[in-house]
Image (tube, helix red, strand yellow):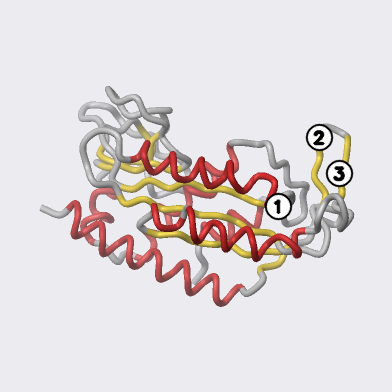
């Protein structure tokens, strides 16, 4: 079997230029978490609610009546009387939600990781607080991609910025420290936390590889199973 989230993440880099300032990329990756939860069918309760379009992936920037940032992938109970959007190729419908049952936040670290790590940690911790605003006990998921390539290039318009190993360290020199700091300061705030370890230079021909695909596959599968079990416990009748 293949996991859609892992495929979606890989497609951000594989064969094309990755644009790090595109805020929609986290949304796109997180969306596939719910497709995978439906696909593995470990929670009959969750799958039935998805199939009946009663519980949906949020498309708005906030829950109705609650001032809170929605996160990259926010799933909950749909508003009665509001028709959900069903898109070709997706099982999980989208619409406005009244509460949060599962919230996911995605961060992708490609280069200059230590320079931005404090902000990333702050954003992750802050998003957990946002998920908990209003009634409910949401399952909070953190997903962070960490690059460990020998070199990496980022782009601002037509300008390219390549790591040089001196002033701008290569990803392989920063990956371990970035993960360690995330484990210490961000991971404890979440119910589940997934590291997506990869290598991508972001240079032609724009190749991509997982540092250990089998390990990532197993870690993600375990996360999906635990989310499914937690959903039954927290949101069952």
Residue at left offset 47%, top offset 71%:
219
Reading the chain from its start, which is encountered first: label 3 or label 1? 1
C-beta proximity under 8 Å, tags 2 and 3: yes
The residue carrying pointer 1 sits among few (fewer than 14), some (14 to 19) or many (20 or more) residues within 10 Å by Cα, namely: many
Q: Residue furthest bottom?
A: 214
Query: Which numbered disc covers residue 110?
Result: 1
- Marks 1 and 2, Cα distance to the nearest angstrom? 14 Å
Q: Is residue 172 left or right of residue 61?
A: right
Q: Earlier in the sequence, mark 1 or mark 2?
A: 1
Residue sitting at x 21%, y 56%: 45
- Residue indicated by mark 2: 156
- Please tell me whether mark 3 sits on a helix, a strand or a loop: strand
Q: Nearer the viewer, residue 179 or 153?
A: 179
Q: How far separated are the C-alphas under marks 2 and 3?
A: 8 Å
Name the residue tied to disc 3.
Answer: 161
Provide residue 220's location: percent of width, then percent of height: 47, 67
In this rendering, the count of numbered labels is: 3
Query: Residue 92, position in %: x, y?
Result: 38, 47
Give whichever of 15, 74 is nearer the camera.
74
Q: Disc 3, disc 1: CB below 8 Å?
A: no
In screen coordinates, is 45 left or right of 106? left
Where residue 58 sits in the image (x, y, percent)? 38, 36
Figure quadrant of residue 131: top left
């Amino acid at each position: 079997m293949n996991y859609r989230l892992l495929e979606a993440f890989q497609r951000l880099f594989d064969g094309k230029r990755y644009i790090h300032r595109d805020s929609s990329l986290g949304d796109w990756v997180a969306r596939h978490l719910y497709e995978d939860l439906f696909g593995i069918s470990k929670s009959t309760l969750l799958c039935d609610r998805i199939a009946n379009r009663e519980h949906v992936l949020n498309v708005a920037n906030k829950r109705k009546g609650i001032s809170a940032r929605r996160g990259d992938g926010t799933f909950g109970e749909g508003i009665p009387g509001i028709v959900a959007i069903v898109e070709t190729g997706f099982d999980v419908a989208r619409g406005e939600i009244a509460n949060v049952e599962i919230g996911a936040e995605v961060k992708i670290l490609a280069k200059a990781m230590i320079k931005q790590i404090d902000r990333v940690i702050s954003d992750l911790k802050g998003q957990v607080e946002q998920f908990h605003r209003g009634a409910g006990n949401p399952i909070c998921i953190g997903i962070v991609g960490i690059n460990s390539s020998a070199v990496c290039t980022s782009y601002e318009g037509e300008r390219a910025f390549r790591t040089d190993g001196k002033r701008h360290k290569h990803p392989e020199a920063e990956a371990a420290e970035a993960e360690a700091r995330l484990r210490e300061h961000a991971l404890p705030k979440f119910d589940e936390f997934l590291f997506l370890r990869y290598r991508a230079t972001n240079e032609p021909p724009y190749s991509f590889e997982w540092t250990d695909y089998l390990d990532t596959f197993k870690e993600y599968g375990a996360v999906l199973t635990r989310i499914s079990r937690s959903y039954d416990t927290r949101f069952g009748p």
